[in-house]
Image (cartoon, rainbow, N blue to C red):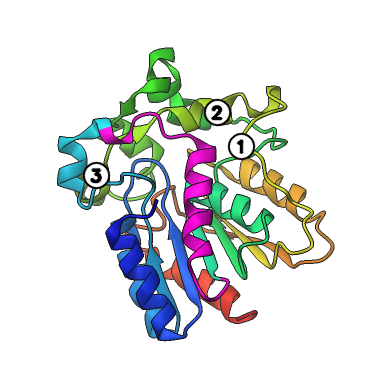
């Protein structure tokens, strides 16, 4: 069930008559991480919807004070939650996601729920095989302890610096950590880690649905968490869809924080330019 805040955004999007843009955050972030993107898309004539995962707190301070609310969330649960949100919109939306949000964006597109989709440094889905060492190191704070499958796990500053903010200055990395970082459920990372060994995995994307719509995958050149090898492998799977445009681009000198750091506008404009070609 969407939160009251999410329902308000849905109602505002419907009342506007504009094409909605549903933004989906990934692990260790909140919907507020998309606020500058939402303003840019609103100025471009879209109706932004910054929806949270189920039970997302409103603020970073609240999230860090009550990490337990994140625990136990699964990929299937979150995907269905966003499908419910989209089902309440009067128009088929654009869907934009980052990291695990990029995975959810592709799941939703595969269900035919998106008018156009942008997946930024997306977490891998079943059939995406590369597993670079930097990805293993980035996920080690969660996967290193099997008990974390049922927990909410915060990142230390050093872990955040490696996984998200390796391509920015020390000063900016600390500012990003203080501004945006929150605990995250461990379960989705464990689900993704075994997706290629589990035929019933929820970490699954229908890449061949003719109703998928146009899709852009964006990769940060210096991303440790989701390097080019992973994003490109997802692209290779997605381009089998002969009924829809599938594109990939790399943003030079950018890490996993590319949607929230000082260079966010370049990534946002890349997404916006793609979406405008189809909407």
Residue at image mark 3: 177
Q: If you read the primary sequence from the N terminus, does the residue marked by circle 3 or circle 1 appear first?
A: 3
Q: Residues within 10 Å of mark 3 (few under 14, many from 20)?
A: many
Residue 242 lies in what quarter of the image? bottom right
Q: Residue at x 39, y 69 (%)?
A: 10
The answer to whether residue 77 is visible is: yes
**Are circles 2 and 1 on residues that touch, CB within 8 Å?**
yes
Residue at image mark 2: 191
Residue at image mark 1: 203
**Magenta residues, start to end:** 69-92
Mark 3 or 1: the one toward you:
1
For numbered disc 3, what is the local secondary structure? Answer: helix
Mark 2 or 3: the one toward you:
2
Residue 66 lies in what quarter of the image? top left
Question: Along the line of sight, which residue is nearer the eye, 263 or 69?
Answer: 69
Query: Residue 174: which numbered mark, if any?
Result: none
């Amino acid at each position: 069930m969407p939160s009251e805040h999410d329902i308000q955004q849905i109602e505002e999007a419907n009342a506007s008559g504009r094409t909605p843009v549903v933004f989906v955050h990934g692990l260790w972030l909140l919907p507020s991480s998309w606020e500058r993107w939402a303003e840019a898309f609103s100025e471009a004539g879209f109706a932004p919807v910054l929806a949270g995962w189920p039970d997302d707190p409103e603020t970073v301070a609240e999230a860090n004070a009550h990490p337990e609310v994140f625990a136990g969330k699964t990929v299937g649960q979150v995907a269905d939650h966003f499908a419910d949100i989209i089902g309440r919109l009067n128009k088929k939306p654009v869907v934009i996601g980052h990291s695990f949000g990029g995975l959810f964006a592709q799941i939703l597109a595969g269900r035919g729920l998106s008018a156009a989709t942008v997946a930024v440094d997306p977490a891998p889905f079943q059939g995406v095989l590369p597993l670079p060492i930097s990805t293993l190191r980035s996920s080690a704070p969660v996967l290193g302890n099997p008990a974390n499958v049922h927990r909410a796990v915060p990142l230390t500053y050093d872990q955040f610096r490696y996984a998200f903010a390796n391509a920015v200055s020390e000063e900016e990395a600390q500012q990003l950590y203080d501004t945006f970082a929150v605990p995250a459920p461990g379960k989705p990372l464990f689900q993704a880690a075994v997706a290629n060994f589990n035929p019933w995995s929820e970490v699954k994307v229908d890449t061949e649905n003719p109703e998928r719509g146009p899709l852009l995958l964006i990769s940060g050149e210096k991303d440790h968490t989701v390097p080019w090898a992973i994003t490109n492998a997802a692209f290779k799977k997605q381009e089998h869809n002969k009924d829809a445009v599938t594109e990939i681009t790399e943003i030079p000198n950018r890490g996993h924080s590319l949607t929230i750091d000082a260079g966010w506008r370049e990534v946002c404009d890349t997404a916006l330019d793609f979406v405008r070609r189809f909407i």
